[in-house]
Amino acid sequence: MKEYLEIGKVNNTHGLKGEVKLEMWCDGVDFLKQLKTVYLDENANKPLTIVSVRPQKNIAIMKFAEITSIEQAEELKNKILFCNRNDATLDEGAYYLADVIGSRVVDIESGREYGKICDIMNYGSSDIYDVVKDKKHYLIPAIPDVVKEMDTEKQIVLIKAMKGLFDED
């Protein structure tokens, strides 16, 4: 499992004192408020100390101790921010998307393997797993009626396939 995970992308500056606007790829501002430090790369070579985080519509406004001017903040535009997975706690039953990608998708009743999750999308109502097998893609809604069990340690997702999700053999 990856130790450092993407939390979002800096898409602009905010004000003149070095604040930035973050397009969040995490659960939201409450998740970010758990963190004391974020990083500019996935190897933790460039740490930024979080001074404050606040919501603004669907983004976060962040202030870092090391960034004190709009000029410095400009240099962060389009940069991906990372966190150490051990710096935050997840609610019970929650998981990091990075831990789900690559998981095998298996029918809970028949044991049939449908493929591996190569991407996770969300268009509002629920996550959608993009499952690929033999270059063919299947879109699986990550809803309780379909996803029955998830083991991120073993990278396996057990599903009960709804009619029409997979081509009949």
Image (tube, rainbow, N blue to C red):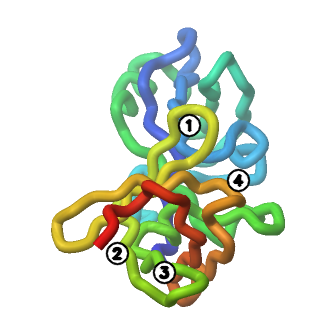
As drawn, is 116 to the left or to the right of 4? left
Are there few (<14), some (14-19), or many (20+) residues within 10 Å of tag 3? many
For the residue labelled by badge 3, is the local secondary structure a helix, a strand or a loop?
strand
As drawn, is 160 to the left or to the right of 81? right
| Nearest the eye: 151 or 33 | 151
Are there few (<14), some (14-19), or many (20+) residues within 10 Å of tag 1? some
For the residue labelled by badge 4, is the local secondary structure a helix, a strand or a loop?
loop
Disc sitting over residue 106 in the figure: 3
Amino acid type of the residue that numbered disc 2 sits on in the rendered structure: Gly
Closer to the observer: label 1 or label 4? 1
User: Which residue occupies 49% across, 50% down?
Assistant: 128
Q: Is residue 47 visible?
A: no
Are there few (<14), some (14-19), or many (20+) residues within 10 Å of tag 2? many
Residue matched to label 2: 115
Closer to the observer: label 2 or label 4? 2
Amino acid type of the residue that numbered disc 1 sits on in the rendered structure: Met
Depicted 158 relative to depicted 125: above or below:
below
User: Which residue occupies 47% across, 47% down?
Assistant: 81
Marks 2/3: CA–CA distance? 8 Å
User: Which residue occupies 67% across, 76% down?
Assistant: 149
| Residue furthest right as drawn | 92
User: Which residue occupies 71% across, 33% down?
Assistant: 53
Residue matched to label 1: 24
Q: Position of residue 69 (x, y in %)?
A: 50, 20
Residue matched to label 4: 35
Quadrant location of the C terminus in the rendered image: bottom left
**Which of disc 2 and disc 1 is earlier in sequence?**
1
Q: Is residue 153 visible?
A: yes
Disc sitting over residue 156 in the figure: none
**Which of disc 4 and disc 3 is earlier in sequence?**
4
